[in-house]
Amino acid sequence: MKILKKFGIPVMSVSGLLFVSLFMPGCNGGDRQPSLPEYAVMELTPTSVTVNNAFPATVRGSQDIEIRSNVSGFIVKVCVDEGDKVKKGQVLFEIDHSIYEASYNNAKANLEVAKANLETAKITAANKNVLYGKGIISEYEKQLADNQLESSKAAVAQAEANLHSAKTNLDYSYVLSPSDGVVGTIPFRIGSLVGPSTATPLTTVSEIDEMFVYFSMNEKAVLNFARKGGGGDLLAGMPEVELKLADGTIYPHKGKVSAISGVLDVNTGAANMRAVFSNPERLLRSGNTGTVLIPEKYDSTLLIPQSATYELQDKKFVCLLNDSNVVKSQEIQVNNLSDGKTYIVTGGLVPGDRIVIEGVGISVKDGMKIKPITKEESDARFNAATANREN
């Protein structure tokens, strides 16, 4: 103490020095509070959104006609190739028609014989009737002549029927396309024996100017659209639909749901549906697969990112932020419809609520206090950090 007085330094008690050292700010930052973690937050506002209902689908031509042979024989000519466009009445296959030509010619000759016999019977009957009128012959002989005439008429009719049948079989040896369309797979080639009993069709001709797209809709969706149609008219409540192709692209023409099965499947509880799409570019082919997208609009709804939710025991939660910026777990209910990125909230949140949209279920915990920032600020910091690492 004498030393301190010698140099003119005021003397303090030891307790005073300790007091100053405890409450005096210094380089150790004793008065600093730990900084709060920053997370992006969004405030919920009602919005209108359109969500697509997705249903797996198969594509068929408006008519897929199996081509079969009505007569038995060997294929002597295949007149088309797979994938060819054909017109109604165009020859697709030729079956060996030599036998049918012979049958036709024979039936034609038999008809000529029957006609000649008919003429003879007519002359005979007329003559017998004259003789009977003069009392020269008995009624018995006259009746025999009349019966022979009727028999000859029946023989002509039978011969004409046989000729028609032979002509039909001959025509059937040329297998024709029943409609405009596209030729499918051709499993039989020249030399193959085919006939009416052949299980596999010769090919299929598909009409593809319009395509039928078949899909199934579950019972809840059926009821939903039926109510929107008014009076339970499901088709009236159905908007135009889109078709997502197997490569993920959207088919350029929209379609219309044109038919629904009258009975739900007892096993699946689903209704079979059919949508019609025009096909001017012939892009769709029978047998394609895809997904029918049926839009449904929601007005004044709350939309949140799926990344802002987490699941616990099959329930969905968000991190709700109170006025003190303290996180609280909040259970929510969402619509089953989803675009894979967002949820439509049906319960648990109201307009004006603030929810954390990053770090949810990982670093953000219930009861944590955070510093809210906007999504744009968060993205800017992330981009800056990424740029610094690259440099």
Image (tube, grey):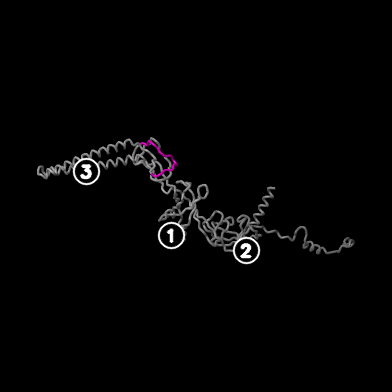
- Label ID, residue 322: 2
Q: Earlier in the sequence, mark 2 or mark 3?
A: 3
Q: Earlier in the sequence, mark 3 or mark 1?
A: 3
Give percent across and percent down for residue 315.
54, 58
- Asked if residue 46 lies left or right of residue 287, the reply is right
Q: Which residues are magenta?
A: 74-88
- Asked if residue 221 lies left or right of residue 174, the reply is right
Asked if one can make out residue 187 in the rendered structure from this viewpoint, the answer is no
Q: Amino acid at mark 3?
A: Lys
| Dots 2, 1 in contact, CB < 8 A | no
Give percent across and percent down for residue 267.
42, 53
Give percent across and percent down for residue 43.
61, 61
Label 2 crowd (10 A; few <14 / some 14-19 / many >=20) = few
Q: Residue furthest left?
A: 135
Give percent across and percent down for residue 349.
57, 62
User: Residue at the spot x=50%, y=58% of the render?
Assistant: 296
Q: How many marks?
A: 3
Distance from Cα at disc 2 to Cα at disc 3: 104 Å
Distance from Cα at disc 2 to Cα at disc 1: 46 Å
Residue behind mark 3: 153
Q: Amino acid at mark 2?
A: Asn
Q: Secondary structure at mark 3?
A: helix
Q: Secondary structure at mark 2?
A: loop
Q: Amino acid at mark 1?
A: Asp
Instruction: Name the foreground residue: 38 vs 305.
Output: 305
Mark nearest the camera among 2 and 1 is 1
Label 1 crowd (10 A; few <14 / some 14-19 / many >=20) = some
Residue behind mark 1: 233
Name which quarter of the figure residue 166 lies in: top left
